[in-house]
Amino acid sequence: MADANRNGAMVLTTSRKAANRIYERLIEVRGSLGREYPISSAGYLGTASAVDVFKERGGAIVGTKGLWQGVDVDEPDRLRLVWVNKLPFAPFNDPVTVARREVVRAAAEAADEADPDTVANERYYLPLAAMDLRQGVGRLVRSVDHRGVVVISDRRLAGPTRLHRAYRQIFLGSLEGLVVDDEVYGPGGGNIAPMAEAWRRIWSFLAEDPTVLSTERAAALSSPEALDEHTLLPSVRAIRDARLSDVEVDAARDDGSLPGLLAERAAVIASLLREKPTDLYDYQREALDHLAAGRDVLAILPTSAGKSYLFQLPALALPGVTVVVSPLVALMTDQALALNRTAGGMVRALVAPMRESNSRTGKAEVAAQLTGEHDYGIRIVYVSPERLCQAQFQRWIERGVEAGIVKRIAIDEAHTFATWGEDFRPALKRAERFLERLRAHPNRPRLIALRRRRPCAGARTRAAGACSAGPPHGRGSSLDRPPARRAGCGPRSRSRRWRPRHATRSAA
């Protein structure tokens, strides 16, 4: 923003909603910095007017399809950055696209290809989108005098799988002269970098021309602190700082301070999640103490007693990945969305409403995290009992347990395993058998079973059996709450006041 007439930026998106959000965010940043800096929105001004403002005054311009082609910025120093917010796929249900893709698919089927749909995508649908990407990148690459950076923010380009390689080969391969290959990741692999490393490269590249960025300023922007501030939400940085490393856990366990240290860090993370100072309940501290001692935990708590914190806080405060199994899809979706608003991508839910469940890329990232092939920063993975019973997912879990990555498995609504069983969901019984197999592994993960209200003694024993080889041990304690009220009614009679009790149990 030091010179609005030079070193401008163009943001290309594929949806008006995303373009409007980015534009509004840029306005907020400009206001917080107290700078006068032109920011044009093709959505608000129209493409032609926004482009005219950008050519005349510089700054930043944000737009959708109209900016992807036919917009030329002749002055080389006017535009230095093109940010492609998302790969520009054509609508999958567009009649012309559907018809042409079907021609390719039918030809592949006639040729006896193993997967005609994949062939149709890779030979027609993806190259079609790559043509639009090439047009977008062409907004910067106009002549030998134009010099700048193209940023493509789409996680489908990153990763070691065949699908990731195909995306890189098709999309990045269409950008002649800009692709950097890599021995491990193949074509375009050298262009892929985590966000912090990418910005370090960008600042270094721009500093090669002192008229664009001084070396001193580039060095300041490339410091670890500046990169963290630039690429991570404040809450994500705080959660990461509160997280214990393997070395810290081992040292604290040796000197006996791990229970207190874990409770301290968990309270910090709870305050970040709730966005206000938060103290842990005694029973939450008790459960954390058992986990710190390497025991399994069975917790029987009333609704809204904070039982989800018994697996969320250890997952975010301790090393490793926690797999959460629940039969309630809506609950998992709500928890994952709420956590990610603060934790910024540390949580994934492989359930139908979530994008990662319906995306091969999303599932590949979860697989890579669980097996240790790549660290995407995922700390919690929500799954249904049916997903846990899939042979492929079980292989991922077993590899993660073997590598010491999958540290904890939480069973939410554990009474469904203990009392309903396969009469309710056949997968529950198969999931229980899988957990029994894990229990015999030398690196077996700690198990956390959560149940609402108080079941019968037999149900408690069966739930505990899913957690460990022996019966649970520990103690119960009470949780008093104010009397419940119903809208339009007075307080319930004293005999009907809700004074729920809870019990936390652990098994070595």
Image (cartoon, helix red, strand yellow):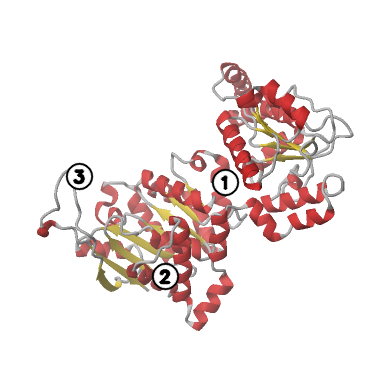
| Quarter that holds the C terminus | bottom left
x 44%, y 73%: residue:
292
| Quarter that holds the N terminus | top right
Mark 3 or mark 1, earlier in chain: 1
Q: Is residue 211 left or right of residue 332?
A: right
- Distance (Cα) linking label 3 and label 1: 47 Å
Mark 2 or mark 1, earlier in chain: 2
Q: SS at mark 3?
A: loop
Label annotation for residue 411: none
Work out whether residue 446 can be spotted: yes
* Residue 86 position by quadrant: top right
> Mark 3 and 1 residues: CB-CB less than 8 Å, in contact?
no
| Observer-nearest of 211 and 364 | 211
Label annotation for residue 487: 3
Mark 3 or mark 2, earlier in chain: 2
> Mark 2 and 1 residues: CB-CB less than 8 Å, in contact?
no
Say which residue label 1 marks.
364
Q: SS at mark 1?
A: helix
Label annotation for residue 291: 2
Q: Please provide percent x and percent y for residue 305.
A: 31, 59
x 56%, y 70%: residue:
246
Instruction: Tell me the amino acid under the disc marked 1.
Output: Ala
Q: Please provide percent x and percent y for residue 89.
A: 62, 29
